[in-house]
Image (spheres, grey):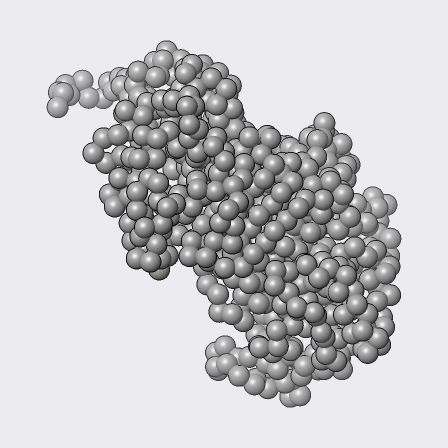
């Protein structure tokens, strides 16, 4: 294990681990690695920590990772624990605690019996057997299920098995994206197939939308097991069939047709079977080129659909214009099989550096209505043209035409992080993008012949206009606003309004950044005793409430919940916005109302320095429901000042020392530390932190308005609808 992993287990900073190495001769010597990146023996480190009274403060998921690592590679215990995870999810917390407290031999016997209760939990699963060496891993699994939920435990098991199998290029579809794709399907789609099911996110989203027969296949056994268990947890009432194998070469459901297909297939696979499948009957729209495996997946999906059935697929943007796939694209368009293409912003999902696209297909019906147009929606325009949280130039143009409110929700992101797709997706405004896309799709499908284009956002393009020499179906190419779409007078009024708002915001920023009253603490930094949030909770100074996430044990309803109150989402904390979430952002078991004075902590770190990790709930937040990926701390006002608590909890070093994971960085609130100060001094610090919060908010709003103003001016000048201001300093200037 690395020094960073030691710091997470011990609940200290990496600097503290470095000090231990230098100051204590009995600190375990490195057992592997290099001089600059040493690796340590985990049991030796744990023994050393126990000898000095350092109890583990690792999160339940990190405890499970540690227990699995102790068994070493090749043990196969992660695969064997999947059935136990599914079966144990049906136990109460008290039953799990009682089970974990048994002696090793009794624990192993009970674990085997429990796992045997769900023999079909994993595809091709055999009777589960555990050995004496597995006892610690079984206990860690039960603890993870009890504290973090069964889905978190399943994800750790899959992560371990994927690591041992040296699998690469395996990334989970973000839940927000999965739900958007599922909601593009007809409401009555009951039988759904995912031929590259991965972790099962798409099938789980389909179940939330009402699907009751779920079919999935994946080439990796671990992903098949992961999907099967996920569906047992999130959709126990659905009929599921999960298989392992290569869907293109060895279709596990050759005679099955379904109402809908949801799929995020592998990209750029050159070994998909081009030669051996050259005469396959699935290629109704032409043989997919050797380097266009995605077109093989598209036709595989269409072959499994009932006439009139829909397929929604996540595909790379190059598929829209590569010359090698032109003929197949043309045939899909001529047949009316391609219904819509939606572009997504970069960093919404892996690969992070490109904006993927959602393609919507519908299998033609014999004698059905001829389809004459394809819908294009540009969901990446704001990412491309403007700063996060600002309107893009095309959005501004659209606003000036009064084209209506359909799809008017702007994309807002709470910063971005290139380190992980999951972290990026957690801070992405999926609700805004979903509203934008679904509004356009509903209008198009309801009346495609009378659909009104929204310049810069969406356009329905006649098939004949697409069937040119390149057959390019890139959304940005077809939806961009033109000069004819913009009202010059309306844009000029918009510019004047933006200038007034910007002037007011600059004045507010100047007031917030006043430098009076800040004094040095002395010759050196202050030192104080600290306590963890867990210590404060045990002492009654605060209460920690944790929002549930999809798949949490105890959910009886896999459908999307309906809520009448606003939902506070993690992105709102990061961006300083009022509650903007919807039912998409909350699980049915997470109806936790927020009260003024509560301290809110994002559960997933990331988003850059501009993204806040904490905030104190005010009157605009009061009554909102707590969304996913948020921890709520409710302090006793007689003992803790809320702004004092939020300020210290959100410090970068504090967050880093209480976080686990490398790609998806989870914050464990119990490990966050707070200075022990008298209430009066807390209030002094709290007032300072409140001023810092106001400064951060003013900076963000000023930057948003400045970017919006610049984008609007650029649009007006380049479209020829605004004239440059007169320049009296150059009276003799001549035109070019």
Based on the displayed image, in which of its 4 quarters is residue 203 positioned? Answer: top right
Residue 35 x, y percent position in the rendering: 48, 82
Based on the displayed image, in which of its 4 quarters is residue 133 positioned? Answer: bottom right
Residue 110 sits above or below residue 730 on the image: below
The quadrant the N terminus occupies is bottom right
Give the side of residue 151 with respect to residue 311, left or right: right
The quadrant the C terminus occupies is top left
Residue 307 x, y percent position in the rendering: 47, 32
Residue 73 x, y percent position in the rendering: 57, 77
The foreground one among 66 and 131 is: 131
The foreground one among 110 and 315 is: 110
Counting every numbered tag in the picture gives 0
Residue 200 sits above or below residue 6 on the image: above
Q: Residue furthest bottom?
A: 25
Residue drawn where x is 31% and y is 25% of the image? 463
Residue drawn where x is 67% and y is 83% of the image? 44
Give the side of residue 559 with respect to residue 220, left or right: right
């Amino acid at each position: 294990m690395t020094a960073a992993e030691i710091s997470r287990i011990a609940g200290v900073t990496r600097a503290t681990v470095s000090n231990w190495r230098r100051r204590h001769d009995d600190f375990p010597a490195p057992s592997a690695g290099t001089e600059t990146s040493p690796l340590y023996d985990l049991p030796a480190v744990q023994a050393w920590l126990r000898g000095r009274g350092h109890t583990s403060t690792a999160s339940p998921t990190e405890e499970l990772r540690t227990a699995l690592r102790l068994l070493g590679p090749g043990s196969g215990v992660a695969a064997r624990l999947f059935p136990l995870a599914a079966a144990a999810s049906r136990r109460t917390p008290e039953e799990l605690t009682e089970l974990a407290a048994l002696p090793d031999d009794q624990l192993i016997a009970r674990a085997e019996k429990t796992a045997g209760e769900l023999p079909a939990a994993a595809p091709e699963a055999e009777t589960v057997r555990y050995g004496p060496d597995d006892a610690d891993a079984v206990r860690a699994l039960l603890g993870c299920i009890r504290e973090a939920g069964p889905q978190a435990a399943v994800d750790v098991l899959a992560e371990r098995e994927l690591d041992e199998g040296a699998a690469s290029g395996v990334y989970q579809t973000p839940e927000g994206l999965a739900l958007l794709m599922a909601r593009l399907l007809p409401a009555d789609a009951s039988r759904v197939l995912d031929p590259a099911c991965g972790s099962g996110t798409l099938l789980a989203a389909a179940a939330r939308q009402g699907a009751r027969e779920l079919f999935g296949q994946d080439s990796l056994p671990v992903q098949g097991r992961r999907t099967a268990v996920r569906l047992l947890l999130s959709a126990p009432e659905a009929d599921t069939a999960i298989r392992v194998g290569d869907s293109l070469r060895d279709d596990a459901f050759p005679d099955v047709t379904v109402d809908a297909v949801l799929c995020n297939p592998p990209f750029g696979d050159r070994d998909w079977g081009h030669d051996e499948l050259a005469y396959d009957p699935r290629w109704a729209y032409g043989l997919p080129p050797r380097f266009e495996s995605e077109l093989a997946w598209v036709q595989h999906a269409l072959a499994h659909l009932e006439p009139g059935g829909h397929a929604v697929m996540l595909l790379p943007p190059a598929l829209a214009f590569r010359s090698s796939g032109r003929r197949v694209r043309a045939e899909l368009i001529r047949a009316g099989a391609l219904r819509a293409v939606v572009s997504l912003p970069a960093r919404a999902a892996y690969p992070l550096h490109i904006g993927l696209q959602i393609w919507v297909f519908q299998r033609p019906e014999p004698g059905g209505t001829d389809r004459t147009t394809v819908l294009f929606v540009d969901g990446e325009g704001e990412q491309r043209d403007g700063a996060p949280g600002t309107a893009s130039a095309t959005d501004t143009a659209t606003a000036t035409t009064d084209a209506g409110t359909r799809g008017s929700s702007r994309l807002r992101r709470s910063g971005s992080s290139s380190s992980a797709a999951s972290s990026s997706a957690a801070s992405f405004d999926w609700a805004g993008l979903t509203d934008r896309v679904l509004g356009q799709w509903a209008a198009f499908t309801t009346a495609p012949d009378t659909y009104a284009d929204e310049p810069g956002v969406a356009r329905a393009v006649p098939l004949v206009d697409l069937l040119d020499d390149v057959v390019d179906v890139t959304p940005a190419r077809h939806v961009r606003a033109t000069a004819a779409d913009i009202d010059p007078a309306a844009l000029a009024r918009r510019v004047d309004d933006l200038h007034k708002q910007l002037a007011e915001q600059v004045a507010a920023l100047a007031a917030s950044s006043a430098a009076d009253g800040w004094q040095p603490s002395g010759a050196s930094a202050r030192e104080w005793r600290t306590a963890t949030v867990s210590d404060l909770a045990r002492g009654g100074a605060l209460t920690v409430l944790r929002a549930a996430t999809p798949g949490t044990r105890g959910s009886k309803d896999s459908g999307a919940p309906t809520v009448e109150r606003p939902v506070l989402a993690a992105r709102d904390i990061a961006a300083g916005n009022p509650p903007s979430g919807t039912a998409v952002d909350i699980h049915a078991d997470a109806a936790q109302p927020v009260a003024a004075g509560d301290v809110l902590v994002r559960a997933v770190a990331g988003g850059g320095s501009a993204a806040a990790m904490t905030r104190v709930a005010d009157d605009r937040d009061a009554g909102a429901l707590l969304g996913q990926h948020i921890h709520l701390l409710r302090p006793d006002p007689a003992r803790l000042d809320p702004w004092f608590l939020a300020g210290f909890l959100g410090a970068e070093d504090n967050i880093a020392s209480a976080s686990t994971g490398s790609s998806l960085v989870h914050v464990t609130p119990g490990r966050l530390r707070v200075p022990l100060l008298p209430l009066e001094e807390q209030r002094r610090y709290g007032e300072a932190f409140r001023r810092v919060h106001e400064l951060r908010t003013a900076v963000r709003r000023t930057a948003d308005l400045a970017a919006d103003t610049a984008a609007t001016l650029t649009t007006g000048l380049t479209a020829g609808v605004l004239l440059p201001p007169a320049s009296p300093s150059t009276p003799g200037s001549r035109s070019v």
